[in-house]
Amino acid sequence: MTRLVVGPFNRVEGDLEVQLDVADGRVVSARVNAPMYRGFESMLAGRDPHDALVIVPRICGICSVSQSVAAARALADAAGVEVPPNGVHVTNLMLACENLADHLSHFYLFFMPDFARPVYADRPWHAEAQRRFAALAGAHARAALSARQRWFEIMGTLGGKWPHTQSIQPGGSARAVEAAERIRLLAKVREFRAFLEATTFAAPLEEVAALDSEAALARWQARDPLRGDLRFFLAVADDLRLDALGRGPGLTLSYGAYRRPDGGFELPGGVWDVALNELQPVDAESIREDATHAWLAGNAPLHPREGLTEPWADKPGAYTWNKAPRLGGRVVETGAIARQLASAQPLLRDAVARAGASVRTRVLARLVEIARVLPMMERWLTALSPREPFFHGDRLPDEALGVGLTEAARGALGHWLSVRGGRIERYQIVAPTSWNFSPRDAAGVPGALEAALEGAPVREGEDTPVAVQHIVRSFDPCMVCTVH
């Protein structure tokens, strides 16, 4: 048995280290370490509840809007305030802008550059991978970075700045959109559409979103195998058998993404059971956080509403600052793949039924999500009524409880708030990477990534196994949110 410590990982957000036990060229077990402590939950205690709107977005520089939305929803729940339709649409626009930018960054800047490395020099697609995706030099990666920069002008218009915008409030958006601005915003969305349809998909977004099976995807790919970066990724994935790498726990969680004014969701949530091929409702009351192997006080699993965040740096048996969230005692995976499965996207349901959640299906889910969500943004913009309210004022009682659930790019994000005497008594956060990169729980059950790494191949002499890197990056970790 050989022990490898891989890390710190590059091209991930925050600090990450993975300890691997290897035997006979395979990973036997893994422990995922989030080695940085931050303590935002402790900072919030004793403050005015609305301070959360300023402090919480600073947990992260790449998914700050998601944190803003969750905080605003927790405060809205505590205050009992309703968001007007315009406020719903603008919040969705900002959240989608951030989420799609994250998906684009993950694909072009974090994930695909690995295939341009010399380890794959003998593959027939390697030269093309270098041309498109080589770090700092790939033609498509550079084009994507430019498109992303222009895309964020939407955030500047709607929120004033990014990251850490302050326009998202419990009662909606503090920034009204004028009729002329709506036209300019629609032009920005259509500019991004043009980049995606020319470079990422080489096809209309609606054509990609309509793919309803693996057979349909294979026919679509075969028509022009290397045209567009999705087809190129599929060719690489087929060659390297990425559908057999990094299997998930078989249970995915989504709270539901992009609220509608009628209270529903554009992408409905749920818990997808891969083995049963069945969608179950989310029971948020069954969430527990287990700190057995975290450098945090307390071992008894607690609901976030009652959670504690007290550092214990010398705790016996601990190996990470991340708690172990469980849903009804079970390990779940979250992210774009969970949203696509819960919202009944037929291609992803078909692909996961065959191969489970894997490196291939996680990346495919993000790209399909881009194709599905951008047309929604066009609809939200056209649905805005500039003369109607974008915001309703809120007033918090001195004693209150609130829950804010949303979907960040990386998956299910929840904020739990309790107010006593007009001040924050407790504030707890369960972030997407907290779910995916959780440590073992009290029963010794590994988290989603830890289990997904088991069985990964390790080549002779590899200090940083390439297969391990593909698996880790397929989850798109955001470690600063994890350790909040």
Image (cartoon, rainbow, N blue to C red):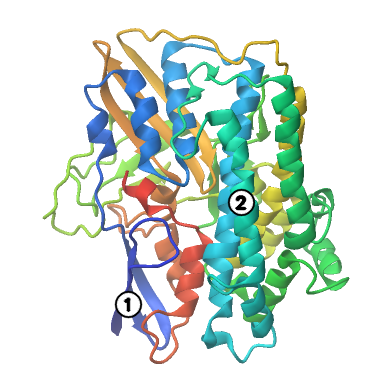
Q: Nearer the viewer, mark 1 or mark 2?
A: 2
Q: Locate residue 427, reporting x and y percent.
A: 31, 29
| Residue 217 % position (x, y) | 80, 63
Q: Is residue 131 left or right of residue 289?
A: right
Say which of 28 and 469 sits in front.
Answer: 469
Q: Residue at 73% of width from left, 58% of height from top?
A: 350
Identify the residue at image location x=50%, y=57%. Answer: 476
Position of 337 relative to 139 (above/below): above
Q: Is residue 45 visible?
A: yes
Task: State the image coordinates of residue 367 (x, y, percent, origin top left).
Answer: 67, 56
Identify the mark nearer the N-term, 1 or 2.
1
What is the three-letter code of the residue carrying label 2?
Arg
Q: Which mark is residue 148?
A: 2
Is residue 424 shown left or right of residue 188? Answer: left
Q: Amino acid at mark 1?
A: Asp
* Image-based side of 55 in relation to 478, left or right: left
User: Callout 1: helix, strand or loop?
Assistant: strand
Quadrant housing the N terminus: bottom left
Callout 2: helix, strand or loop? helix
| Residue receiving disc 1 | 21
Placement of the C terminus among the 4 image quadrants: top left
